[in-house]
Amino acid sequence: MSVEFLLTTLIVVATPGTGVLYTLAAGLSRGVRASVIAAVGCTLGIVPHMLAAIMGLAAFLHTSALAFQALKYLGMAYLLYMAWCTMRDKSPLAVVAATVPRSETKVIVSGILINILNPKLTIFFFAFLPQFVTTNEPHASVLMLKLSAVFMILTFVVFAIYGVFAAAVRTHVTSRPRVVTWMRRSFASAYVLLAGRLAITDR
């Protein structure tokens, strides 16, 4: 496994996007455990894109404008839904033991959907992985699976670090109502901006 692959993966994973935003929001609102669970969900959301790329379905998505547009608009709709839910939530963010925590399943499912409904991830895997597999590689699919597994592990680690950091500062954030309001508006605006960016992206 090349150093180039590890460095490129770290850069890609660490670049703030919907997954990072979701993990940060989970850490700020519900603490370390929720942020780690959110990181798990976002990481699992990579699996369909990874399998699609390895099995060649990404080629179909890349050539079919209808399939790409359909997935893109679903992703936009979900991001806008996340923005609406964030703005609609008026509950205080109290730093207490979670006696009635949000369902772990819901946190994971939301994280999975955020990444599944991003067609650029499939195209990314389709363009990214082959660069690190030689044309004469006898077990190309196996190698791509290994590289994908490393990508997923690094995704989880980096996202978890983001989330744990957010959880560490949540006391300073949640003790100030104005900061909480600003935070919610910022996250909601970020979701809207990401949806807008997805809307104007081409294949």
Image (cartoon, helix red, strand yellow):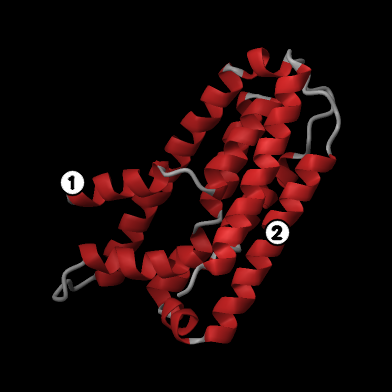
Q: Secondary structure at mark 2?
A: helix
Q: Answer above or below: position of 91 versus 118.
A: above
Residue drawn where x is 72% and y is 37% of the image: 185
Labels 1 and 2 touching (C-beta < 8 A): no
User: Which residue in the structure is indicated by mark 1?
Assistant: 3
Mark 1 or mark 2, which is nearer to you? 2
Asked whether the viewer can see residue 97, the reply is no
Residue 191 percent coordinates (x, y): 64, 49
Measure the alpha-carbon separation of dots 1 and 2: 35 Å
Q: Is residue 156 visible?
A: yes
Residue under circle 2?
78
The amino acid sitting under disc 2 is Tyr
What amino acid is found at the position of numbered circle 1 in the picture? Val
Using the image as rendered, state which of residue 26 and residue 43 is in the foreground. Answer: 26
Residue 61, horizontal then vertical, whole percent: 49, 80
Q: How many marks?
A: 2
Q: Is residue 166 left or right of residue 132?
A: right
Mark 2 crowd level (few <14, some 14–19, many ≥20, 10 Å Cα): some
Determine whether 180 is above or below 197 in the image: above
Q: Secondary structure at mark 1?
A: helix
- Describe residue 163's horizontal placement relative to residue 14 as left or right: right
In the picture as drawn, the residue positioned furthest to the left comes out as: 136
Within 10 Å of disc 1 (Cα), the crowding (few <14, some 14-19, many 20+) is few
Picture residue at 67% right of the left edge, 55% below the top = 79
Which of the 4 image quadrants contains residue 125? bottom left
x%, y% of residue 173? 66, 18
Residue 163: image location, x then y, percent? 55, 30
The residue drawn where x is 48% and y is 73% is 202
